[in-house]
Image (tube, grey):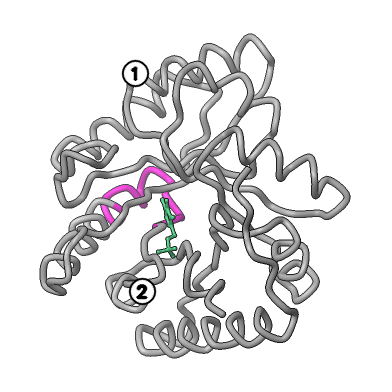
Amino acid sequence: MADYKILSRETLARNLEAVIQRIEAARIKVDEHHIVKMVVVSKYTAIENIATLYDLGQRAFGENQVQQLEERVHALEDLPLEWHMIGRLQKNKINKLIDLDPFLLQSLDSLDLAEALDKRLEAKEKRMECLLQINSAREESKAGVAPEAAVDVYREIKERFSRIDLRGVMTIGAHTDDKATVRKSFETTRRIFDELQSEGAEICSMGMSGDFELAIECGSNMVRIGSALFAE
Ligand SMILES: *Cc1c(COP(=O)(O)O)cnc(C)c1O
């Protein structure tokens, strides 16, 4: 595994506080009752830093690779952490992921993957909570369901795959410095989320270090923050 830098408790406490303050300011601008949950994306940081953030009060962490998720779940198994899988799930890693019992798979990105996942969940007599990933900016490099198909795919997964508990949607904002384009990708996802609330959708996961305030303004209630927390 890569050799990640261990940060001091003071540095992590300062970064955590700064990010929480920014989330707080953004969510209050939307509505004082609007709650936003933060998932700390730990993929580029040392295990020690995760333990320190836990000690500082953070519970939810996300990884984008099953292999690294597995290492960390095991290394930190004494802590009551909530693990999110946020990266592309290859079919040959499905069994491993199920065995890790993640809190939430945020990157369910096709009907095909849903079918394979459901089959393996059935065999293991387990269930999994998932978000449907939407390719809101229609970027070829990104996974996810096309916006115009998202509502139908969500309904079809709910109907056909009884071991998958869909809880909402996830997106990665458009990969550009043009704020209007990023906003558009978040607004597209928000509209889909609104349409799916009648189907029980509760989570709208969008916003990373570079764009979480804009995402919250557009209706996000779950942000996934990595690099902003691990600056020195
Ligand atoms: C890496 C990653 C993040 C966090 O990115 P930062 O810019 O470091 O905050 C969020 N979501 C997904 C899906 C990621 O892969």
User: Residue 55 location, x and y as percent?
Assistant: 80, 71
Residue for point 44% across, 66% down: 221
Look at the numbered disc 1 and give the secondary structure of its residue: helix
User: Residue 78 location, x and y as percent?
Assistant: 88, 50
Residue located beneath label 2 in the image: 216
Residue for point 27% across, 30% down: 153
Some atom of ligand 1 lies within 8 Å of the CB belonging to the residue at label 1: no
| Quarter of image, res 177 | bottom left
Q: Is residue 28 left or right of residue 49?
A: left
Magenta stretch? 193-204
Mark 1 Cα within 10 Å, few/some/many (few <14, many 20+)? few
Residue for point 39% across, 85% down: 26
Q: Is residue 231 left or right of residue 107?
A: right
Question: How many numbered circles does the render carry?
Answer: 2
What amino acid is labelled 2 in the image?
Answer: Ile
What amino acid is labelled 1 in the image?
Answer: Asp
- The first of marks 1 and 2 along the sequence is 1
Residue located beneath label 1 in the image: 112
User: Residue 179 location, x and y as percent?
Assistant: 16, 74
Q: Quadrant of ligand 1?
A: bottom left
Q: Which mark is residue 99?
A: none
Look at the numbered disc 2 and give the secondary structure of its residue: helix
| Quarter of image, res 58 | bottom right
- 132 and 31: which one is in front? 132
User: Residue 149 location, x and y as percent?
Assistant: 18, 35
- 65 and 118: which one is in front? 65
